[in-house]
Amino acid sequence: MPTWHYSTDIAEKNPEKTAKAMMWDAPISPKEATELARVIRGMKLTEAKAYLERVIKMEEPVPYRRYHGKVAHKRGLADKHGIPMGRYPVKAAKYFLKLLKNVEANAEFKGLEVEKLKIVHIASHKGMTIKRWMPRAFGRATPEFERRTHLEVIVEEVE
C-alpha cells in the first residue's frame, strides 16, 4: 500500500495552531488546480471560500499565469492580479471548496477559530491518468485520457 504524506512539514512545527486536509484522485485538470491553488494561497479561509463561490457562479475569473496559451482576456483581471488572461474553472473550484470545508471542519474539531484561519500551504500534484480507447472507423482508435489530481491544504490560526 502506498503511504501518503504532505509535501511540507509546516503542520508538524506547530500542530496546536494548524489543521490540514487532503484529497486524492480528484477528477480535475492538474493545470486548472495549479492556477486555482496559486490564487487562494495566502488568503483567509473565509475569503477563499467566498472567492471560490464567485468562481463557481462565474462572477470572478481565475488568472492563468503559467498555463495561459490561447486563453482569452477577462475584464478587470489586469487591474486586480496584474495579468489579463483568465478562465472560470468551475469543476476545479467545486473540489477546492469541498477541500476547504473539510479543513474547516478539521480546524473546528481541534478547537481553532475559523475566522482567524489563514491558508499557509496549498498544493496540487498530478495523479494517475486513466487511459481508455474509443474505437473509430477504419480500425482506428482515439485516446480518452482522464487525468486525476491530488490536493492538499494546511491552514494556520493567526492573530
Image (tube, helix red, strand yellow):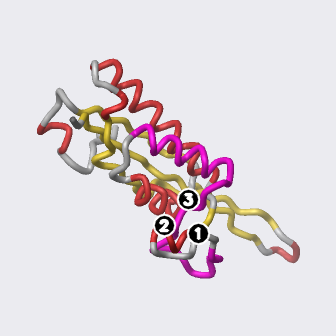
Residue lying farthest to the right in this orientation: 137
Q: Measured from the top left, where is residue 155 in percent x and y?
A: 30, 39
- In the rendered image, residue 46 lying in the magenta stretch gets the answer yes
> Quadrant location of residue 144?
bottom right
Contact between labelled residues 1 and 2, with CB atoms less than 8 Å apart:
yes
Give the extent of the magenta segment: 45-73
Q: Which mark is residue 76?
A: 1
Q: Measured from the top left, where is residue 32 in percent x and y?
A: 53, 61
Q: Amino acid at mark 3?
A: Ser
Q: Specify few, some or many for label 2: CA neighbours under 10 Å numbering under 14, 14-19, or 20 or more.
A: few
Mark with earlier residue (3, 1): 3
Determine the CA span between mark 2 and mark 1. Answer: 6 Å
Q: Nearer the viewer, mark 2 or mark 3?
A: 2
Which corner quadrant holds the N terminus?
top left
Q: Measured from the top left, where is residue 52 in percent x and y?
A: 55, 47
Q: Which mark is residue 29?
A: 3
Task: Classify mark 2: helix, strand or loop.
Answer: helix
Q: Which residue is mark 2?
A: 80
Mark with earlier residue (2, 3): 3
Residue lying farthest to the bottom in this orientation: 70
User: Which residue is depicted at the point 46% across and 68% down?
Assistant: 81
User: Which residue is depicted at the point 39% across and 32% down?
Assistant: 103
Q: Is residue 102 left or right of residue 147?
A: left
